[in-house]
Amino acid sequence: MSMGTMLYYSVAGGLVLAALYLVYKWCMSGERQFVFNRATLIAIYIVSFSLLPAVDALCHISAPASSGIINVRVVGAGAYYKGINWPGVLLWIYLAGVAAMAVATIVTYIRIASIVRSGEHLRIGRYTVVLTGSDEIAPFSFMRYIVLSRSDYAEAGNLIMSHELRHLNCMHWIDMLLAQVVIIFNWFNPAAWLMRSELRAVHEYQADIAVLNTGANAREYQLLLIRKAMGKQFPALANCLNHSMLRKRVDMMLADRRHAPLRKLRTALLIPAAVVAVAALNIPAVGAALNVMRTGQLVRKPLPTNINITPAKANRATITLNGEVIDSERMNEIEPSQIKSISVDKSSNPNGQIDIYTK
């Protein structure tokens, strides 16, 4: 896949992602059906970036090369001239953003690995608890590790462990990796960032309810969340105990756990949203713009085949010899000593006409 094609599918898929996110936020975000919402969010990711290649191949939604002329002028038979290659500039900006996000993700992973390596390890079943000496880092989990400070372990170890074990048992870290990959390649799209926030919120709702289901005191647990609200987080990869939206999390813990099963039918609205988004990509102006991104160059419109274009001639005066139009080669044959008269006429020719008569 070329860089231009990657940009094309990133932008087109991002538009579909934005449409589906808006429907999810409107219809499902506030519902207390966390497992179902998590599955829906993951499905939105998959549909957004797998639907377009199939539809593109079947329906050719991108504009053909003859859709228009952008910053192109003819300077000769079959020759083109163009100014700044804006599609190329756009591609380099996009790639710079991808590189920056990839580096930021790697740096975050290195920080997490460093903390895990430097802490004290306690084996609990198939997971490892990492105790650190720093109280500045909020408890978090990633892959098979639960990281928390020694003071947090002594103060509220059971509550924190119940919360983080739910994250690990549900493999929430895989969801976060998926969301981060989308952000790396779709960094310019606000919907990509908002989708990750929604996914992390659902993760925290699941973990919070798991803690309460153990019989923990709800007030004690909520106060713990407030006390840990200032710790450092690793939003790119890890699930942190002090995830933001504390008020929303508390509301979800206090909300009625009963919900109407028919509300799940709202997800059916995602289907027309996807159809509308793909149809929007078939609008000529949108398709042409996406095609420019994919090809990485200006769109060129073929010249009509019924027009014969010849290279433009230089602006020269017409020269006649004894009443006959001659070219530069015949001019070299004239002997100046044999010239009888020379006259210049500008009335019949914009470039002028020179009449030469010989003896």
Image: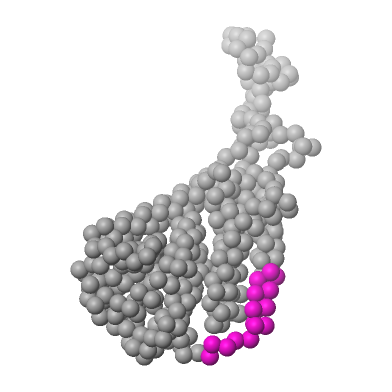
The residue depicted at 40 percent of the width and 57 percent of the height is 101
> Quarter holding the C terminus?
top right
Residue 43 position, x and y percent, is: 59, 65
Q: In the figure, 200 relative to 65: above or below?
A: below
Of residues 52 and 204, the one nearer the viewer is 204
Q: Is residue 275 magenta?
A: no
Seen as rendered, the residue at the extreme front is 125
The residue depicted at 31 percent of the width and 64 percent of the height is 123
Seen as rendered, the residue at the extreme right is 306
Residue 67 position, x and y percent, is: 69, 50
Identify the main secondary structure in magenta: helix
Residue 340 visible in the snapshot: no
Q: Is residue 264 magenta?
A: yes
Task: Please state the extent of the stretch shown in magenta in the rendering.
Answer: 256-272
The residue depicted at 39 percent of the width and 62 percent of the height is 126
The residue depicted at 79 percent of the width and 37 percent of the height is 306
Q: Quadrant of residue 61?
A: bottom right
> Quarter holding the N terminus?
top right
Of residues 254 and 21, the one nearer the viewer is 254
Which color scheme did the rendering employ for the protein?
Answer: one colour
Residue 51 visible in the snapshot: yes
Of residues 62 and 103, the one nearer the viewer is 103
Residue 66 position, x and y percent, is: 70, 46
Q: In the figure, 293 relative to 177: above or below?
A: above
Q: Quadrant of residue 220?
A: bottom left
Seen as rendered, the residue at the extreme left is 133
Q: Is residue 158 left or right of residue 284?
A: left
Q: Quadrant of residue 143?
A: bottom left
Circle count: 0
